[in-house]
Image (cartoon, rainbow, N blue to C red):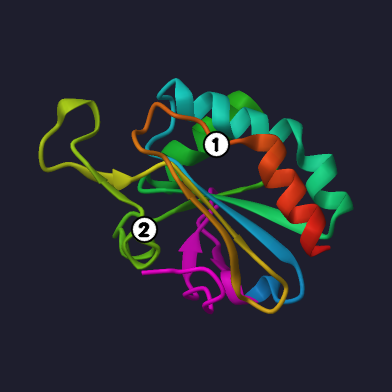
């Protein structure tokens, strides 16, 4: 479980080019972890595009966004290409990171037994401490984007 003011669990996941991306490599930066249930699933498309459209704000605030889903690197690559996503989409195909951050959702789209990432946002400060945690009560709910940007501003 990842709680406020606790050290964020480190991880190493594959991006769309199958390169390893470690959370620890962003030490000193604010990191926004945006967990999403699945590429090409309506609300996820809207969420990732909303974050993409705000990347200038995040970059100006010495922060980075990492999208995390259980999708394969290949599915994430097509998703990033279609929507011109300008931040790393990471593949948590073994679900370890989603579990470490308590972001597992069971039964997406009525598929009982299918575990995916829930929709949620974790903001980690430059020292690696969790400073913000939001989890959707159901995958159809989007995060509060202005609130995310304000929290990142407060940490920069």
Quadrant assignment, res 27: bottom right
Q: Is residue 51 visible?
A: no
The image position of residue 57, as x and y in percent, is 83, 43
Residue count near mark 1 (Cα–Cα under 10 Å), binned few <14, some 14–19, many ≥20: some
Instruction: Please tell me which residue is depicted at 44% across the width and 20% down the height of the picture.
Output: 42
Q: Which residue is mark 2?
A: 98
Q: How far across and how far down the image is residue 55, in percent?
A: 77, 41
Front residue of this view, candidates 8 and 146 = 146
Q: Residue at x 76, y 36 (%)?
A: 54
Judging depth in this view, the residue of 83 and 61 nearest the camera is 61
Residue of label 1: 143
Q: Residue at x 39, y 63 (%)?
A: 97
In the image, the segment drawn in magenta is 1-24
Compared to residue 73, the image places residue 26 above or below, namely: below
**Helix, strand or loop at disc 1?**
loop
Few, some or many C-alpha atoms within 10 Å of disc 2 (few <14, some 14-19, many ≥20)?
many
Residue mark closest to the camera, 1 vs 2? 1
The answer to whether residue 109 is left or right of residue 11 is left
Assess whether residue 10 is covered by the magenta stretch. yes
Across and down, in percent, residue 9 comes to: 47, 75
Task: State the count of labels.
Answer: 2
From the viewer's perspective, is residue 64 above or below residue 82? below
* For residue 140, above or below residue 16: above
Tell me, yes or no, whether the highlighted magenta stretch contains residue 55: no
């Amino acid at each position: 479980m990842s709680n406020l003011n606790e050290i964020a669990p480190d991880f190493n996941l594959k991006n769309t080019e199958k390169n390893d991306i470690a959370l620890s490599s962003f030490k000193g930066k604010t990191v926004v972890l945006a967990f999403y249930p699945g590429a090409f699933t309506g609300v996820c498309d809207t969420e990732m595009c909303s974050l993409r459209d705000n990347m200038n704000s995040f970059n100006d605030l010495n922060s980075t966004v990492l999208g995390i889903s259980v999708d394969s690197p290949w599915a994430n690559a097509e998703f990033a290409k279609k929507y011109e996503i300008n931040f790393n989409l990471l593949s948590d195909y073994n679900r370890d990171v989603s579990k470490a951050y308590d972001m597992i959702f069971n039964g997406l789209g009525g598929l009982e037994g299918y575990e995916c990432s829930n929709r949620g946002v974790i903001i980690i400060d430059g020292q690696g401490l969790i400073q913000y945690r939001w989890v959707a009560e159901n995958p159809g709910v989007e995060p509060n984007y202005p609130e995310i940007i304000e929290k990142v501003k407060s940490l920069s």
